[in-house]
């Protein structure tokens, strides 16, 4: 038996032998099991993104348009790796940063796989040069008044080199005013995916981890003593809500990716993913039931 088949069989046995969610008595029980689950989910993500549909792609790789999707799936896998690391190290605030980036990446990835046109990929690549556009404009303006210093010359040369690599002219970049895929922000991408009602509950609320809102400072970085505040340097402790939903989201996205890439022709990995995801959904539902019962 080859290593891949052996490892997938081990994960399948682990999923089949998983205890019923009602068997977990405490939050610690949930989190110990979820930490194990996340490790196995990470293996499935790494495996899934490496699967290819045919020998031609295995030998030569993906064309650029499809590589945009593949790159997003690799990014999602690495972000989940970071989430898993911070969950395991009980660093809620850093896990929250990964969570927000996971939401953004999977939304864009699902849009690219299901709603994008050929122009969407061009739009995505061109929008990636927003900072370079500002730098180029600044360097061009400076070059009219003085000689550029060596580091400025290298920066401008690098920008122009990357533009040529992507088939973008200087004029196209300087004229561009669209800095999102198809001119759509995340809320609009979610609307196109039929998920607009979840914006504030997922991407919107998780943005506090990136921008450092007062809510995040108050709950995780400060401790109130009377009417004053003192620093709180210890990390918050992750719970089931910070582990189960993002793991489910990433497995769901991998399922969609394998359908898009056709990298699992026999369907064995997709079947295992579906079983794994459904097991985690049942666990998450049990946890939510316990939470609602305890607070009612």
Image: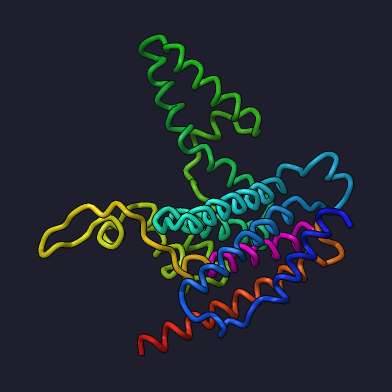
Name the residue nearer the viewer: 222 or 125. 222
Left or right: where 169 falls relative to 57: left
Q: Position of residue 44 (x, y in %)?
A: 70, 59
Which portion, as a residue range, is magenta?
244-261
* Colouring style: rainbow
Q: Position of residue 116 (x, y in %)?
A: 65, 57
| Residue 247 shown in magenta | yes
Instruction: Work out which residue is located at the far top of the displayed protein and give it.
Output: 147
Q: Residue at x 75, y 50 (%)?
A: 50
Name the residue nearer the viewer: 291 or 210. 291
Name the residue nearer the viewer: 150 or 30. 30
Instruction: Work out which residue is located at the far left of the displayed protein and give it.
Output: 227
Quarter containing the N terminus: bottom right
**Dominant secondary structure of the residues highlighted in magenta in the image:** helix
Q: Position of residue 288 (x, y in %)?
A: 47, 81
Which quadrant of the structure image shows residue 193? bottom right
Left or right: where 121 falls relative to 97: right
Name the residue nearer the viewer: 218 or 31. 31
Instruction: Count every numbered label the image shows and give the total.
Output: 0
| Residue 286 shown in magenta | no
């Amino acid at each position: 038996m080859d290593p891949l088949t052996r490892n997938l069989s081990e994960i399948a046995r682990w999923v089949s032998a998983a205890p019923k969610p009602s068997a977990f008595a405490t939050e610690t029980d949930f989190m110990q099991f979820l930490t194990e689950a996340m490790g196995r989910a990470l293996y499935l993500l790494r495996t899934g993104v490496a699967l290819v549909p045919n020998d031609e792609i295995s030998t030569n790789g993906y064309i650029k348009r499809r590589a945009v999707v593949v790159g997003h799936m690799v990014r999602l896998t690495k972000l989940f790796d970071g989430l898993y690391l911070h969950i395991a190290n009980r660093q809620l605030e850093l896990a929250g940063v990964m969570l927000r980036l996971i939401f953004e990446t999977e939304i864009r990835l699902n849009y690219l796989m299901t709603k994008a046109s050929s122009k969407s990929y061009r739009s995505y690549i061109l929008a990636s040069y927003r900072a370079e556009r500002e730098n180029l404009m600044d360097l061009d303006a400076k070059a009219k008044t003085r000689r550029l210093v060596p580091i400025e010359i290298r920066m401008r040369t690098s920008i122009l080199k990357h533009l040529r690599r992507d088939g973008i002219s200087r004029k196209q970049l300087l004229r561009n005013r669209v800095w999102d895929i198809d001119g759509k922000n995340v809320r609009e991408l979610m609307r196109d995916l039929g998920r607009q009602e979840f914006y504030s509950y997922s991407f919107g609320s998780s943005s506090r981890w990136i921008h450092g809102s007062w809510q995040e400072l108050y709950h995780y970085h400060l401790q109130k003593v009377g009417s004053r505040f003192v620093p709180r340097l210890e990390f918050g402790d992750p719970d089931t809500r910070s582990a189960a939903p993002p793991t489910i989201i990433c497995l769901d996205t991998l399922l969609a990716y394998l359908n898009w890439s056709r990298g699992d022709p026999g369907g064995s990995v997709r079947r295992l993913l579906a079983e794994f995801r459904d097991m985690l959904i049942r666990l998450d539902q049990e946890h939510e039931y316990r939470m609602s019962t305890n607070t009612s």
